[in-house]
Image (cartoon, rainbow, N blue to C red):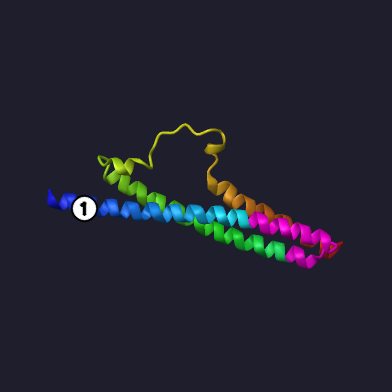
Amino acid sequence: MIAHERDEQIAVEKYKLLLDLWKTEDLNKTNQLQMLMATNSLLVLAFFLTGQSSWIALVGFLFSFVWILSLGHTVYLQTHWRAEMEVLRERCAGNALFQIQSAELKPSVWGKVPSRYYLLGTPIVATVSWLVVLLYTLFK
């Protein structure tokens, strides 16, 4: 019985650590998405103020591409940590702490859209848009 209690205590500590890591990345991805939008807004303004400079379009393309990689990494980490938490939840089904993650909630229409779609979709759209603008400025 002592070994089982010790295993559950270790599982609780691991779960708390994973949850903290997941929460930290959640804040990071929100900040990254906001910075992507702010940077692209400034670049669009600069693009038109400089008379549609191809350099601005190139910078916009590069920034947006880097954000795809950064947000993709964040989504990967959160998916990995959530899967680890799910393993612990299934292993210790009797412990109420592990049931936090599996709350049966009826999400609204907006809550049904997984964050990875807009987290990766936004920089992909921005990257493709800047690439089109870059090609337009180079070949006009």
How many numbered callouts?
Answer: 1
In the drawing, does residue 67 fall left or right of residue 96? right
- Is 89 in front, or is 39? 39
Residue at the image position 26 percent from the left and 44 percent from the top: 92
Tell me residue 88's x, y (percent): 31, 48
State the extent of the magenta-drawn residues as a range. 36-58
Q: Residues within 10 Å of mark 1 (few under 14, many from 20)?
A: few
In the drawing, does residue 116 fall left or right of residue 88? right
Tell me residue 33's x, y (percent): 59, 54
Which quadrant, please, contains the C terminus?
Answer: bottom right
Residue at the image position 63 percent from the left and 55 percent from the top: 123
- Tell me the chief SS of the magenta region: helix
* Type of the residue with mark 1: Asp
Q: Is residue 51 visible?
A: yes
In the drawing, does residue 92 fall left or right of residue 69? left
Tell me residue 36's x, y (percent): 64, 57
Residue 113 picture quarter? top right
Magenta run includes residue 34? no
**Helix, strand or loop at mark 1:** helix
Tell me residue 30's x, y (percent): 55, 52
Q: Is residue 131 visible?
A: no
Query: Which residue, as the protein is rendered here, is positioned at the far bottom?
Result: 55
- Is 98 in front, or is 123? 98
Residue topped by disc 1: 7
Magenta run includes residue 38? yes
Residue 103 picture quarter? top left
